Image (tube, rainbow, N blue to C red):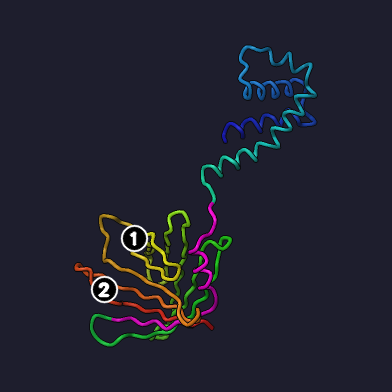
């Protein structure tokens, strides 16, 4: 990449209409030396007789250099297509009315309402979920989730951030997917301080008109207790 860029800059001198004969010969000589590595050949003498041919050759290099650079990038970071996970996430798109229920350890459940708009982004590879929560005290809070599916590993990954706090949460599935249910385990950002164990589950009901998100706390014995339920009804 760096070599191609340097070659391109010097080659541009050779094909510039105002280039002097000396600078043109130097530039062409450098390009030929860099490309063919001819340390012992009198390059400048050869170019005096073949300037027209070499200018065409340098122009060709300038045209193909970007393509070579892009090919190298694609090899370094290969693209991959959407998979079965994206097909399910696409069914979550739309505008939703949300009922959020929080289940405290003691006392009655706390119910609040919210709205959510979900849509696919990045050429249909990720789902973005924008929530607005209407709190009991009359204030509002917002939150955004990004959900993706890696077709190579068969794993879902979600990221959540909101206006209530400055931290972000990441969840990931274990690589098993039945095409209908998403099961996400909390992924600690600090391995030495994993925090509480939780699991989140999501699935559609009533022919896709209802979407349920449920979050469970897992104790040391592996028992689960539901903490939060988001019941979403498509408008």
Comparing 141 with 107, the one in front is: 107
Residue that badge 2 annotates: 224
Q: Residue at x 43, y 62 (%)?
A: 156
Q: Is residue 95 magenta?
A: yes
Classify 186 as above or below 50.
below
User: Across the whole image, how many numbered discs are drawn on residues?
Assistant: 2
Residue that badge 1 annotates: 187
Q: Residue at x 71, y 37 (%)?
A: 63
Q: Quadrant of the C terminus?
A: bottom right
Comparing 62 with 85, the one in front is: 85
Classed neighbour count for the residue bearing mark 2: other residues with Cα under 10 Å, few (<14), some (14–19), many (≥20)? some
Q: Residue at x 65, y 40 (%)?
A: 66
Left of 167 or right of it: where is 80?
A: right
Q: CA distance from mark 1 to mark 2?
A: 17 Å
Dot 2 lies on which element?
strand
Write down the region rendered in magenta. 80-103
Classify 62 as above or below 194.
above
Question: Which x, y percent locates residue 125?
Answer: 53, 61
Tag 1 near tag 2, CB within 8 Å: no
Q: Quadrant of residue 1?
A: top right
């Amino acid at each position: 990449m760096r070599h191609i860029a340097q070659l391109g800059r010097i080659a541009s001198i050779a094909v510039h209409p105002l280039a002097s004969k000396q600078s043109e010969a130097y530039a062409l000589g450098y390009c030929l030396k860099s490309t063919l590595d001819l340390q012992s050949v009198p390059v400048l003498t050869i170019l005096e007789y073949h300037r027209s041919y070499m200018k065409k050759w340098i122009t060709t290099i300038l045209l193909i250099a970007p393509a070579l650079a892009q090919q190298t990038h694609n090899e370094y970071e290969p693209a991959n297509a959407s998979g079965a996970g994206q097909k399910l996430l696409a069914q979550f798109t739309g505008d939703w009315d949300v009922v959020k229920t929080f289940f405290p350890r003691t006392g009655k459940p706390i119910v609040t309402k919210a709205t959510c708009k979900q849509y696919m982004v990045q050429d249909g590879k990720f789902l973005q979920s924008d929530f607005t929560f209407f709190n009991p005290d009359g204030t509002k809070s917002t939150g955004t989730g990004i959900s993706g599916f890696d077709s190579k590993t068969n794993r879902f990954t979600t990221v959540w951030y909101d206006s209530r706090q400055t931290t972000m949460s990441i969840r990931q599935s274990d690589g098993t997917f039945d095409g209908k249910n998403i099961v996400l385990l909390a992924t600690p950002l600090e391995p030495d301080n994993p925090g509480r164990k939780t699991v989140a589950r999501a699935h559609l009901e009533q022919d896709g008109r209802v979407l349920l998100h449920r979050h469970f706390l897992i104790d040391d014995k592996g028992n689960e207790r539901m903490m939060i339920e988001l019941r979403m009804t498509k408008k």
